[in-house]
Amino acid sequence: MHLAELKEKEEGILLRFEDERLAVKLMAMGVLPGSRLQVIRKNGSGNTLYIRVDQMHLAIRKTEAECIILK
């Protein structure tokens, strides 16, 4: 399942990334396989997701969320 498929308040465990460049950026910030991700909310158009990763809050684009695989 992709992160973009989750609804608000749903969560999952990061399994892997489909985009290597995105993986490098997020892993440098501490977003690692095994991290718990939760969708806090989506903006009105759904193009931005506000997520919690362990104890950190991030905003990511929907296109980026479609490259994050959860289990």
Image: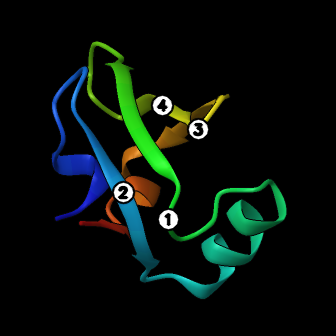
Placement of the C terminus among the 4 image quadrants: bottom left
Placement of the N terminus among the 4 image quadrants: bottom left
User: Residue 25: x, y in percent?
Assistant: 76, 66
- Vertical arrangement, residue 36 with respect to residue 34, above or below: above
Does label 4 or label 2 sit earlier along the sequence? Answer: 2
Residue located beneath label 3 in the image:
54
User: Residue 39: x, y in percent?
Assistant: 35, 30
C-beta proximity under 8 Å, tags 1 and 2: yes
Relative placement, left or right, of 27 versus 19 is right
Badge 4 density bin: few <14, some 14–19, many ≥20, Cα 10 Å: many
Alpha carbon distance from label 3 to label 4: 10 Å
Along the viewing direction, whichever of 63 and 34 lies nearer the viewer: 34
- Vertical arrangement, residue 19 with respect to residue 45, above or below: below
Along the viewing direction, whichever of 50 and 30 lies nearer the viewer: 30
Query: Which residue: 16% across, 30% down?
Result: 7
Residue located beneath label 4 in the image:
51
Relative placement, left or right, of 61 versus 25 is left
Marking on residue 13: 2
Tag 3's secondary structure?
A: loop
Tag 2's secondary structure?
A: strand
Alpha carbon distance from label 1 to label 4: 15 Å
Tag 4's secondary structure?
A: strand
Q: Amino acid at mark 2?
A: Ile
Residue located beneath label 1 in the image:
34
Alpha carbon distance from label 3 to label 2: 10 Å
Alpha carbon distance from label 1 to label 3: 10 Å
Badge 2 density bin: few <14, some 14–19, many ≥20, Cα 10 Å: some
Q: Amino acid at mark 1?
A: Gly
Does label 1 or label 4 sit earlier along the sequence? Answer: 1
- Vertical arrangement, residue 6 with respect to residue 7, above or below: below
